[in-house]
Image (cartoon, rainbow, N blue to C red):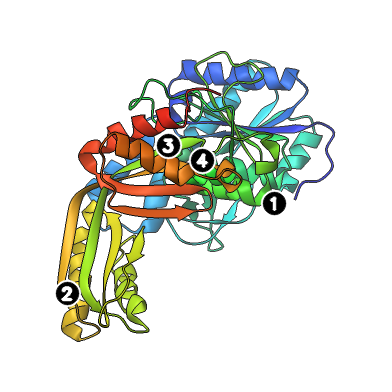
Amino acid sequence: MGTARAMPLLVMKFGGTSVATPDRIKRAAKRVAREIANGYDVICIVSAMAGETNKMVGYVNEIAPFYDAREYDAVVSSGENVTAGLMALTLQEMGIPARSWQGWQVPILTTSAHGSARFIDIPNDNINAKFAEGMKVAVVAGFQGVSKEGRITTLGRGGSDTTAVAFAAAFNAERCDIYTDVDGIYTTDPRITAKARKLDKIAFEEMLELASLGAKVLQTRSVELAMRYGVRLRVLSSFEDNNENAGTLVCAEEDIVESKAVSGVAYSRDEAKLTLIKVEDRPGIAAAIFGPLAEAGVNVDMIVQNISEEGHTDMTFSCPVDQVKRAEKAMNEAKTRGDFAFEDLVADTDVAKVSVVGIGMRSHAGVAAQMFKALSAERINIKVITTSEIKISVLIDRKYMELAVQALHDAFALEKA
Ligand code: ASP
Ligand code: MG
């Protein structure tokens, strides 16, 4: 963990669109220069220039559809190396002492799970020694590390966010600023309602629950890591002039003084609902159903078991629509094996999930009732309901999804701060 430092430290991460051209790298470098002028040392995490990683993934698949994952990582990690060097050069041209670091040079030690590696250790002595010698910016290639076998690894798409948070934790940074092409996290998707409002602050838990709104902005794992280590994360645009309150701060619940019952409305368009009709109701039946589904790689989300009648019950679950075939196969195979019996398996592939999320639900009563009332006013039928402490989700017909999001956004007055 962080050692005592002369200067406060900031982690600044620039995503692919923010470093897409030499000109944009210069603009990003100017932001770094401003923080240096504010008295910070900076660890600057960079993504590959926009489009580069996709291009390289394409090359790999063209040459070897069943590729050796170690070589996949050797290829796709390289985009970040280019940006790191270019950013260090840009800063040097501006007279700022900067040095680039590839993952293995830090060294960022990860697991050997190529393509989805996880951090094991980020030692800070090498980089801190350079800061002590007067370096002002360590530019670190995001998305990559090195395994104990000495091979280059990558963290999964979007992994530079997670690199940034891990460095903020390892070096005890004051904050981790994620510069991207949107100006923050919104109450809902602005493409669905123009009333969507940028949030000034959002709790880690809410951010994780709002994955459908935030996942394109922040890799989920980066939020989990930030929550675990209490890293204050700020998401902000690299295309605007940002003032003190720019962007959205993703932070601990305690840092949010007053919260409304609902902070945001999330959705997931491509869901399916499957119901096993008349399965025997006996101990072990849920395990017998969901074990094979897990083994088949079906991501089960909602689960509802009906009350039982004459020793039989209906079991309903939801999963992504493109996994329905896999789920049906797993269930029919289990039936053939004699694991359990059921009368029928009914799939509804035209559903969407809409959720209201907010830590304020812990202290506000009646949120569910208000949600159902808003949906009923639009004559939207609810097919499945699930709740957690900070989220209420419903499955509805897909064709009403946008309408439901708009109705709920209005019902909870999310356009108002
Ligand atoms: N360049 C990598 C990707 O596109 C990592 C990142 O940008 O976060 O997935
Ligand atoms: Mg990203």
Q: Closer to the camera: disc 3 or disc 1?
A: 3
Secondary structure at badge 2 equals helix
User: What residue appears at the point 38 percent right and 25 percent down from the top-left corner?
Assistant: 190
Instruction: Read off the residue under disc 3.
Output: 265
Label 3 with label 4: CB-CB less than 8 Å? no
Q: Is residue 350 left or right of residue 224?
A: left
Q: Closer to the camera: disc 1 or disc 2?
A: 2
Crowding at mark 2 (Cα within 10 Å: few <14, some 14-19, many 20+): some
Label 3 with label 2: CB-CB less than 8 Å? no
Secondary structure at badge 3 equals strand
Instruction: Read off the residue under disc 2.
Output: 332
Q: How far is mark 1 from mark 4, CA to CA?
A: 18 Å
| Relative to 318, residue 15 above or below | above
User: What residue appears at the point 31 percent right and 39 percent down from the top-left corner?
Assistant: 376
Q: Is mark 4 within 8 Å of ligand 1?
A: yes
Three-letter code for the amino acid on which mark 4 is drawn: Ser
Which numbered disc covers residue 123? 1
Mark 3 or mark 1: which comes first in sequence? 1
Mark 3 or mark 4: which comes first in sequence? 4
Secondary structure at badge 4 equals helix
Which residue is at the front of the view, 104 or 288? 288
How many numbered circles are shown? 4
Mark 2 or mark 4: which comes first in sequence? 4
Instruction: Read off the residue under disc 4.
Output: 160
